[in-house]
Amino acid sequence: MKNYYCYVYTDPRKNGIYSYSSIDLSFSPIYVGKGHGKRYLEHLGNIENHYNPKFKYKLLKILNGGFSKKDIENNVQIIYCNSEEKAFDLEKRLISEIGLENLCNLTTGGEGVSGYIFTEYDKKKMSESMTGKCLSDDHKRHISETMTGKRLSEDHRRKLSEVKTGIPRSEDAKKNMSKAKTGKYLSENHRRQISETMTGKHHTDKTKNQISEAMKLRWKNMKST
């Protein structure tokens, strides 16, 4: 049986009396979460790549202020709950009492990061933190397993299409895409799915020309290899 709990990260630089309905703190709260096992420690594992930019920079400021990860860990307050549902409820209540504006949480709790809309600043910082980094084979495999069997909604597909529309690809990118597809054959099931997706759709003359040019280029690359 999993022991669920609600945890509160505090700022060891700011001591005082912080009293709430379910907990009394000696330091200013900065983040409220819910989990089980060693979940509360995961935030300290790889701070530089933390998904939450607000929490990431808060932790880095504390570390740069002369405190260690152990100091931060020792000041995490944990409240155990009888069930995951109660842990979620407590998380939401504490965030509400403390005030989302006073915390590094992205949402009001109870659902992780889903529902949060990242700002352009958040996106820029996350992009910069990932630039030049290569995923390990285990990480790639985990992503692949996570996405297997998932189907995108029509609205999701449309948004992805709108984001990509008009973005020019470099010659190197085109060559890499061509090489990746060269020699690959679609399964009968994949062909059937494509056929069903395209049934009843009509291409514009512009699209037909683009498909024609792409196929000519692909055939040319195949003959040159």
Image (tube, rainbow, N blue to C red):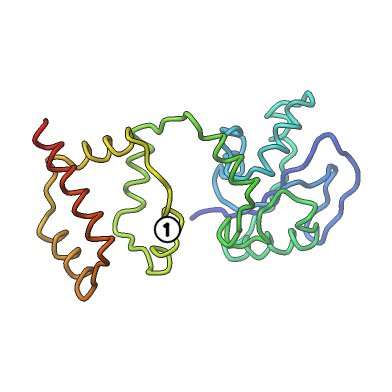
Left or right, 137 with reference to 41: left
Q: Quadrant of residue 23?
A: bottom right
Residue assigned mark 1: 160
- Image quarter in which the C terminus is found: top left
The image shows residue 37 at horizontal and vertical percentages of 54, 45
Looking at the rendered structure, the number of numbered marks drawn on it comes to 1
Q: Residues within 10 Å of mark 1 (few under 14, many from 20)?
A: few
Q: For this rendering, which residue is in front, 221 or 35?
A: 221
Q: Quadrant of residue 149?
A: bottom left
* Residue at 13% over, 38% down: 220
The image shows residue 13 at horizontal and vertical percentages of 84, 34
SS under mark 1? helix
The image shows residue 190 at horizontal and vertical percentages of 16, 59
Left or right, 33 with reference to 2: right
Residue type at mark 1? Leu
Left or right, 151 with reference to 21: left
